Image (cartoon, grey):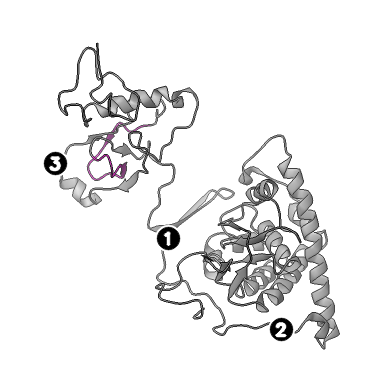
Amino acid sequence: MSQSCDENTSLLAAAPVGDDEQCISCGGAGCGVCRPKVAADAFEDSGASHGEEPKRALCFNCNKSLSRSSDMNCVGRCFTCASAKECSRSHLESFPECYGEILPGELHFCCEVCGEGWEVCQACGPGVVIERKFDYYDPQKGTLVQEDIPDKVLHKRKSKKRGLVASVQDEADPELVASVKAGADLAHGIVERTRALIERVGNDAMEMRDQDWHEESLLGDLLGGGDIAASLVQLAGSAQKVLSSQTTVSEATVPCKVYGDLHGQLRDLLLLLHMFGAPDDTSPSFVFNGDFVDRGKHQLEVVTILLAFKVAMPDKVWLNRGNHEDPTMSKKYGFYDACMAVGDGGSDVFAALHSAFEWLPLGTVIGDRILAVHGGIGDGEWLLDDL
């Protein structure tokens, strides 16, 4: 009877090493000779070969995350006499695109726990490879931009802590009072139209990716019609007034819901709010933790909704600043183009929104215990009082 060398110790299903042969290399402990066969059979038996998506980012043997690896640079490859390695997934039907072998120094993935014998080629590995560069692909234009990370990305912020400004009713300028009130009315209208859009998208019978969602009037409908550029400038001005009245580090009460990088993915935002609830007077607090713009198809729509939430519910919704809420970044990665696509007044929209972004807080303390920041701030040697 054929028998796996580690049928008593493997967490995977026992499987034969071969026809009427038993592994003698490891004495039943499992090795690079027999365990790939065991794991392969267990993977095929798991149902992944019947239409389920295989877990490309995990090692089939121990279920731990794979690590990105490259043994040597391109110059070293030209002078090496090392032999190629076989991809451990080359014989599985679920990976028809497999390279088959891994050349010396070629990018691949390995399991740091299992070691040799479990290398995975680039085609069979995780779908996303993170390089030490900024990369941006615009699906609308079909262009790819890749640049080295700059040494510094500076935020244009005031250095002093800010206190509360006088209320709108106490302002001496009647025109300013009227402007602020109009901005508040605009924000409340956007919030109500957003709630209707959340219900519509949440109840759609057919789902689609955000980049495939095309409605020409979507931004105009959110803003309630009229001059889109003028409405966005007005909303940005109202948001700036609210943000400038609050501190550099916000304080959110619990319970609290935290949402990460949206990057213009409107449909994702709407579906999340449909499944987990949208902000209102009785809801938990909400923290949107930066990077609202760039990359996605619906950047202005996402910013419109978030700023409207902030103006309408200033002590319920908190918007942290991300590295993409910066004019240098957003001129490179898509937000500037999105603003200019508005038409006449596009440059005014870009300037007004970034003027508001400069007043976004750097972080939010949740329930006096959790600090939410988008990314690193300096060398990390600072206290909340420093911010």
Image location of residue 118, percent across then percent down: 28, 36
Q: Is residue 198 left or right of residue 46?
A: right
Query: Measuring 51% from the left and 80% from the top, which residue is drawn there?
Result: 385
Q: Quadrant of the N terminus?
A: top left
Q: Which residue is mark 2?
A: 165
Residue 7 or residue 60, whichever sits in front: 7
Q: Which residue is mark 3?
A: 81
Sequence-wise first label, 2 or 1 = 1
Q: Is residue 101 left or right of residue 164?
A: left
Give the main secondary structure, helix, strand or loop, of the magenta stretch: loop
Q: In 3D space, how far apart are the residues under numbered discs 1 and 3 (Cα atoms)?
A: 33 Å
**Outermost residue to the bottom:** 172
Image location of residue 121, percent across then percent down: 32, 38
Q: In 3D space, how far apart are the residues under numbered discs 2 and 1 (Cα atoms)?
A: 41 Å
Label 1 with label 3: CB-CB less than 8 Å = no
Identify the element where label 3 is drawn: loop
The answer to if 316 sits in the magenta stretch is no
Amino acid at the residue labelled 1: Glu
Q: Is residue 283 above or below residue 51?
A: below
Query: Measuring 20% from the left and 26% from the top, which residue is drawn there?
Result: 28
Sequence-wise first label, 3 or 2 = 3
Query: Measuring 71% from the left and 83% from the top, which residue is drawn there?
Result: 165
Image location of residue 170, percent across then percent down: 81, 85
Label 2 with label 1: CB-CB less than 8 Å = no
Q: Residues within 10 Å of mark 3 (few under 14, many from 20)?
A: few
